[in-house]
Structure formats: structure tokens, C-alpha cells
Amino acid sequence: MERTHNNGELRLSDVNKEVTLLGWVAKRRNLGSLVFIDLRDRYGITQVICDESLDEITSKIRNEYVLQVKGKVVQRQNPNPSLKTGEIEVEASEITIINTAETTPLIIANETDALEDTRMKYRYLDLRRPIMQEKLVIRHKITQTIREFLNNRDFIEVETPILTSTTPEGARDYLVPSRVNPGKFYALPQSPQLFKQLLMISGLERYYQIARCFRDEDLRSDRQPDFTQVDIEMSFMEEHEIMDLVEKMFAKVLKDVKDFEIKLPLRQIKYKDALGKYGSDKPDTRFGFELVALNDVFVNTEYRIFKDILGQNGYIKGINAKGLSDNISRKDIDKYTELVKKYHAKGLSWARVKEDTLEGPLAKNLTKEEINGLIKRFESNNGDILFIVSDINFEITCLSLGALRSELGKRFTPPKKDTFDLLWIVDFPLFEFDEDTQTIMAAHHPFTRPFKEDEHLLDTEPLKVRSHHYDLVLNGYELGSGSLRIYDQEMQRKVFKIIGLSDEDIEKRFGFFVNAFKYGTPPHGGLALGLDRIAMILTNSDSIRDVIAFPKNASAIDPMSEAPSEVSLKQLEELHLKIVKD
Amino acid sequence: MERTHNNGELRLSDVNKEVTLLGWVAKRRNLGSLVFIDLRDRYGITQVICDESLDEITSKIRNEYVLQVKGKVVQRQNPNPSLKTGEIEVEASEITIINTAETTPLIIANETDALEDTRMKYRYLDLRRPIMQEKLVIRHKITQTIREFLNNRDFIEVETPILTSTTPEGARDYLVPSRVNPGKFYALPQSPQLFKQLLMISGLERYYQIARCFRDEDLRSDRQPDFTQVDIEMSFMEEHEIMDLVEKMFAKVLKDVKDFEIKLPLRQIKYKDALGKYGSDKPDTRFGFELVALNDVFVNTEYRIFKDILGQNGYIKGINAKGLSDNISRKDIDKYTELVKKYHAKGLSWARVKEDTLEGPLAKNLTKEEINGLIKRFESNNGDILFIVSDINFEITCLSLGALRSELGKRFTPPKKDTFDLLWIVDFPLFEFDEDTQTIMAAHHPFTRPFKEDEHLLDTEPLKVRSHHYDLVLNGYELGSGSLRIYDQEMQRKVFKIIGLSDEDIEKRFGFFVNAFKYGTPPHGGLALGLDRIAMILTNSDSIRDVIAFPKNASAIDPMSEAPSEVSLKQLEELHLKIVKD
């Protein structure tokens, strides 16, 4: 189909050229005897001007018709600086209607007031909006940049199975009944974890995959049943070498896709320090409101609540919302109290700094010395407002204040668009204690390698053992995590034992995998990055749904294709299944 | 982990360098007081030589141990030309055992006599064989070459859903029960066909994806439940433009991956001609044994079988196995007869050319004139043997002889390794007649665009309508097929009607898709190539299993992970399912 130029490329230098354009009618206006058409394709918009001689055809043209336009490029009298082609227009000599269009249920423009349901039902029209196409293009650029980077470093992309068996991530698997093996099911992979480790045992040394993964989780607004991760694994590399490679890769993505220079090497913050200072293991450090430790201020306190906590070796920490006392109302404080309670804090103490002392209910319980101690520790001035949480549990103290910190940051010092704060969190614990089951669990997965210098604690104080696990964090989001893996069979068995697996459990859940370790396993490690989230952040989108071509809604439904749907009795019979009605 | 070089890169020019190598013990030999170790990694093998001073450690070393070796590069006295590093060896000064290995259940070498079951069960060891790694590397190169080619031409890679609804390919879908939508099922896509057409409606103009697809078919030896296709779609392109782009892409793959130059433009053979000449719509034209039309030789025949066939407007065709009479025994002929019968031919006539006439049972039924006619038509000489099939059906006549042609080609003129015969088959029929159901069906899928000049036949003689469908064929394999798609709603409805779909059927099966066509659909088309098959041919493999990292066996089972497997009652309950025992 003839086309000399796309709709984003004509410039003043093209004036007087005879051109042929293709595209969709974005807008059509009558101006006296002239008709103006904004012709749109993936590359941009070109204004087409039609005189009376084309009336017969222009009178039929409606929005979103597909046209071929032949004509001459002329200089525009009133340039439109918001268009790349805004200095020219095309005087049409011939217009062909290639296809017609009914009125679209949503307007094809960057700004939309269409409900998300409508946008998803007519996703093919939603994706016709230039802003949405741009998001898909950026996502494409991200993956190609990553591929190029890894290909240049001898990595091999290997496809791992989608129809497989359950993986050790612990979330719920999607199952696929096997027709030819009645009563048996494949599982869709939650990640290619086992396969990528097996590829290291195979000696492939450097693997990656832009891998589709699946988790049947109870849905939150920003989860998708199928999602994509950048999955990387390599042999014979130390933790710092892996991190070095990954941060260079991501710096290249930021440079190539957003023209943003990031300083390398990235900062590394220890897990404990991140919690202690930002109340989060994925801190956004682009704003302040850092957590302050207060235990020693209250070391001699008679205030019962703090005294109890300290008596149990607990934690008192706080945030100074500097200069914001007048901006934070009682109602806000109530809201913030609810917020920290959601994170299991018992309550939120607060005090306003006024006339060089503290005001508010907390102040009444404190001695003058404690008040001065607080003012000094918080480096506070009149007009500040202080928030304090105390708890016997370190994580609860930190995470609840961390949630408050995020809220304050978002409200009072929202970071600028297109600023990127990239850092590593390291030195994670190997295990965590599960309060529900009162058992020790793998903090991430049971294949993570412990610190050599902590190995002696495995038998005695396993919760103190640190691991070679590392998270890459961007703007307060965890982009991904990785680790060095255990490659020693004895160590692997020991870790399994600590998390309470019997030999039989090990055999049943990981039998073939553990067996593979017998035959010369190289030291290896890797990581996985959430591609959807990276694309979301780099496109300034509010939701990962905006960077997935055909996403599911919060009920795991695709309103366009209406998947999932009912199936025929014959299909169920073939699968040897029956639906059980509640 | 320190490593100065990989095991494939040391050369004579490196002599005297102190190096550190990592890798697996491929072989260990004692030679008097010296121990020779072949150290292997992904890149190759380096010979390591250890003197008595290392006895303590070398005595422990077994095959497939993981080692770090430090030493000096020295010139080898007896170079090994079969190794890239064969001119040097490394005199070890220090060896560290990084990991041990039990005796492997299969030998890690290019040649293997391990059963395929063993190879699949220990796939991680099978993939340690250099020849298998090479296959994965070539597969990787193929996909990256394709990506690079398409990226450079403004194509965008878009991921389409894996959890979706049924697609129109007609094979059986794999189903995935939805836990949060009880009684409903996702389907795994047989191809991204609908999504890629929707992306064209979105105005994306140029899409591709290396896409995972799924078909729950009754298994043949060379089918996989999940497989990969290179999926391409574009707007505003004519058939010849799409074919031009794809053949350039594939020529680049052959050049970059196999250093093979292919002449462009590719030959195009019409579907009817391919059947008539090669008995196949995916002919391997690297050998002869072409089919010869014989109807006019027998136009006045009294031989009952041929007379009957011609009386019913049938077909008589044959193959001359030139000079092979002495090589083809009666037993072979019996085998060939069985072969053509498998393709529904009623039988196989044959005759040996001897003393300028024909010998054999057929000859007795023919007149002298017919015998001379045959000899002339076949351009035959003494020592030839002629095979003839007659049938009222064109396809049966051609396809059965085509099967014989392949057999003769494979046996007597097997093509050389790494020769590539790439061509297009075009002008396919739009519909075909299904003998079982006695109905007209879409020959490929109902979205294929008919020839403009044949549209007048749609109502009267639909089986004569040709379509803009094209197949890319390599060495007798269909690599993929594509078509221009219908973009006119009226035409789409007409085609649906011809294949017997009611308005209700259309709405139910393709409702959202057909609806999308209302809103300004551009002319579009594309194709899909089977990546597994491409990789199989380009790696000279016998099976696509060899180019899939973790394949399933012929029972759709992965002998390594034992997928599919039984699931717990709890899982089934959560999915509202019950297994029905036969």
C-alpha cells in the first residue's frame, strides 16, 4: 500500500514534495470551504487540508476512518508547536477511504475520562491512544536494551517450560489438567528458578530470559495473574560481580530509554539499616522524614508505655515532620494512627513543637529532661510535629513508621517526574520467624546461600544468619531480588532441615532438583527483575495495567475477551473433570 | 571467582602466560608420573597437565568435578587439531576442587548412546554435552538475529496474554481453571492470532513476538505441547511486501547463523503446481524424482483402471526412478505400495525399463503405443523404474506420489548437510472440503483474505477461490504460514457464512473480535514461523526435542520434573473441581 512518509516525519524541508500518507482520522474540522483533517498513525499526526474539490469525499469522512491521502507539503501559516509536524500541512489532491469506522466508545486521545472498565473492554481502542502506544514502545525499548546488554556479555536466552510442575515460591500455582495423563496436572511456573539453576548445573554459565510467570494470588489492585520478569543466572560469580553487572545493565536502560545518567556504583544499604532509617526494605530515598532512634532518650523514663517496651528490649523510634505542624490536623493524625495500626503498631504518639517545648497528650507523660532530649534528638524547631512508635518488635516499629514516612513524603515532598533513585538492599536475613505457624521459614527461598562467617550460627541462632540475598530498589519499589545459591549438598540439606523439611518432604518437593546437585554443581547466583514494574515506573504510569497490552482486571478477568469463560461438558469430560458446585 | 581465560580461548600466542581457569573435568588420564585433565566449560576444552607435586589433589579428582586451575600456558608437543586450544596446554601449579561429582548416569560427550529417556530424565547432564549447548546457542542466535532485524525496521515486540480465551485455530486448548471465578477456565493460546490482529486495529502497524503457544493435540513423536513461534503482523502492506520482508529476515538468519548465502527473491511456487510437480505443499526441491502427468498418454486406453479414472475426470501421474531399477527390489516395491496406500491411493503401478520396453505386471495391460508413450513422457532409459498412481482425486494422486518421492529422495539422493532450499508456496485455496463432515471449511483460518479477482466465485464456487495465504518452506518442512487478513466486515461475514457459522455462532466464538473490526481496521497481514523447527533444521537435529531446553516426551511428560503430577485434594477443592475416574 503506497505511503511515502509517516505522519510524524514531514518538516519544513519537505515543503513542495508530493507525498502519500496513510492513517486514521484523529479530527475533522470544517472552516468555511476548507476541511482540516488530523491524520494519525503510530508515528504522529499530520494536518491535511482539503478544498471544495474534495467535498464529495470529505463530507463522508468521520473520526477513525482509515484514509490514504495524496497531496503536496506546504508551510503552515499558524505553526502548531505541540506537533512534530506542526510547521507544515499537506494540501490534499486525492483522498481514498480505506475503511470506515463507527463512533468509538472512547475518545482516541491522550487525555481520557473513560472508565477503566470501558478502556479494558475496548482495549484495542485504548491502545490506539498515542500515550498508550508510547508506553508499549518504551516497554519494547527496555527489553531490547536489556537483551542487547546481556547478549554482548555472552549470555544466552533460553526458554524454560510453561507447562511444568510446582515451583518453590510458595504462592498458589495455576494448574493445567492433562488430558492424556488423566488426573494429573501441570503447573504454570511462578518463576523459572529451578530451571535456571539446572541450566547452571548444565554448565551454560550465563543465562537470561524475559520470562512469563504466573501466580494465582488473591488479587490486589496492582497484581496480574501473568506477569513478566527479566530472569538472569550466572556461574562462578561473586555477589559483587553480579550486582555490578546488573546495575550497569539498569544504568544503560535509564540512559537509552530515559536519557537519565545514574551514578555507579550504586549505594548499598544493609537490610537492618534500611529498616532502621527508612522503615522499609525498599526505601524511596528521594525525600526525608527519616526514622530516628529514641531508646536512649527514654532509658530512665517512668512513662509506663515506653518503660514497658524498653524493659522487654523493645524499640522506640520516631519521625520529625519538619515545619509541618500547621499542615497536619488532628484529623490527619487520626488517619496516620490508623495507618501505623495497619502495620501492627499499637498506636502513634505525637507532639507539636511550640514555644521550645512539646504540646499534645504525649508531652504530659514526659519529664522536662525527656522533652529536651526529644527536641535535641529530632533537631526540632518550633512548628515541627513529632511522631513516635514503640514496640517490642523491631520490624513492626520500623515498618509502621515507614508507612507513615511514605505518606508524609507523598503528601509534602512528592518527588519530581523522571527522577530515579536506584539502590541495593543487602545483608538480608536467611530465615524469618513465622508468627502464625511459630516456625522458621526461608526469608526468600531455601536455595539462598548463607554468609560464610555466619554459618556457625546455623545450628544455634539461625535467625541471625545473614544471606547473600540482594534487592534492587527504584523509587520505593522493589524491582527485583536475587541471591547467590547454595551449591553444596550438605549445606542445602541443613537449610532444608532448619525450615522443618524431612528427608521425605525434600524428596517429594525438590527431589529431582536436589538430586541434580550431585553431579558437579558450579557456584552460581542470579536475580529476577519485574519487567512490568520497571516499565510502569519508566513510563510514569499509575498501574502495571498500563504497560501490559492486554491486562486482566482486579478480578483476574479480561473484560475484552471475557476470559476466563465457561467450557463445554465435552471439554470437561475429556479432561476427566467435574465442576463442584458449592 | 577468579578466572583469567575461558577454556576455548588460549592459543600459541598465550604461551608463558600465568592463567586461571574454571571448569568441569571432562577427562582425566594418568601417564606415568603425569596426570592430564581435560578441563571443559561452555567455551571449549583446555588440557591441563599436573606433575607429581599435585598428586595429593589429582588423586581425588574424578570426572565432572568442578575445578579452579592456576598454571602456565606451554606449547603442546603433540598438538590436537580437533581442539581450538589444541596447540597449548596448561602446566598446573595449583588446583582447587570447587565441587565434587558422583558418577554421571550418562557420559558427558558429543557422542552418546544413552537412551532418550535417560537423556530427558537427566536433562541437566544431557545439556552439559557440548553438542547440546551448541544447539541452544544457535537457537539463541536465531532469535536474536530475528529480533535485531525486526527492531531495525520499527517493529515492536508486544507480549500477548498466556491466560486467555479459546482461539480459532481449531486444535484442542489447554485449559486453566480459575480459582477466583469458580467453574470458569482460561485457555492457553494456540497462537496470538486474535491479539496480533487487534494490535493492528490499535494502529501499532508493526508487531512481532517470539511467542509461546500451546496445543493439546494427540501426540506425535515430533510435537510438543508448548512450542514457540516467531509471530509477525503488519498493517498497510501487500502480500509481496510482507514476503519480501520475511525472506530478507530469513536470509539474514542463514547468513548470520550458518554463513550461508541464499539468493533473493525466493522462488514462489503455486500450491497447485507444488502438488502437481512435487506431490507436496512443502516440497524439498533439493532432489529430483518429480511427478509427471500422464493423463494424455492414456487418453484412448482400454486398460480398465486407467480408463475408469479418466472417465471420472481423474488423474494419472508417475515418477521415474532413474537408473534405479537394479536398486529397487520387489520387497521395496511392496513397501512403497504400502506407503502410497497410507496416503489413500488405491495402489501403485510400476514397470521396469528393460531392452527399450517395459517389464512388470502393468506392462501386460498396455498397448505398445502406450508403452512407448510412457517411455517418452518419462524420458526413460533402460535401467529406470517407473511408478504410477491414478485416482479421481487430485490431492490423493499427488500426495501419495509425493510421499514416494520423499522416500526415494531420502534413500538415493540425500541432500548434503547445511544446504538450504528456501521457497514460498502461494495461491492456496481459501476453503477446503471436509470429507468427514461433508462441509466447506476454512483451509487455514477464517480471517484469510480471498483474491479480489476470485471474489465473484464466493457465492457460486467457493472451493475455487484462491487466498492471500503463503507458506515459507525450507528443505521440505513448512517453516510457517501467513496471510493477508480480511479487514472488511461484510467480507468477513460472508466467509463465516460459507463455512456454516450462524450469526449466533459468530457472536459466541468471535464476538469481541468481529466487533473490533467496526472501528477503523487497517488492511493487515502477517505470518508465524515455527522457531523450534527452524532451530532443528539449522542445528542438523533429528527432533525438535533437541533444540528445546526442557522438552516433553511423546506422552507429554517431562521425565525430569515428572510433570504433569498429582495435586492435593485441597488444591482441587480450591478450584471447585473433582476428578472423574473412568
Image (cartoon, coloured by chain):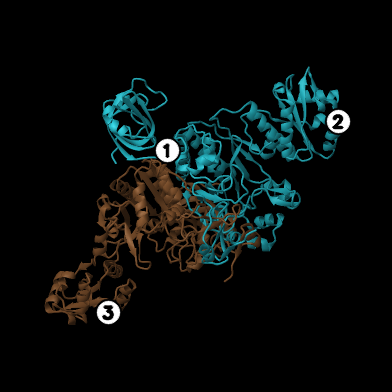
Chain colours: A cyan, B brown
Q: Are marks 2 and 1 in contact (CB under 8 Å)?
A: no
Task: Nearest to the eye among marks 2 and 1: give it.
Answer: 1
Q: Would residue B498 be found to the left or right of residue A577 on screen? A: left
Do pointers 2 and 1 mark residues of a single chain?
yes
User: In the displayed image of the protein, which residue is found farthest to the right?
Assistant: A302
Q: Are marks 1 and 3 in contact (CB under 8 Å)?
A: no
User: In the displayed image of the protein, which residue is found farthest to the top?
Assistant: A355
Residue B191 visible in the shown view: no
Q: Residues within 10 Å of mark 2 (few under 14, many from 20)?
A: some
Image quarter of the N terminus of chain A: top left
At which x and y percent is residue A430? 68, 48
Spatial CA distance of label 2 from label 3 is 107 Å
Three-letter amino acid code of the residue under disc 2:
Thr
The residue beneath circle 3 is: B329
The residue beneath circle 1 is: A103
Q: Would residue A463 be found to the left or right of residue B488 on screen? A: right
User: In the displayed image of the protein, which residue is found farthest to the left?
Assistant: B369
Q: Residues within 10 Å of mark 1 (few under 14, many from 20)?
A: some
Residue B201 visible in the shown view: yes
Three-letter amino acid code of the residue under disc 3:
Ser
Label 2 SS: loop
Q: Tag 3, which chain?
A: B
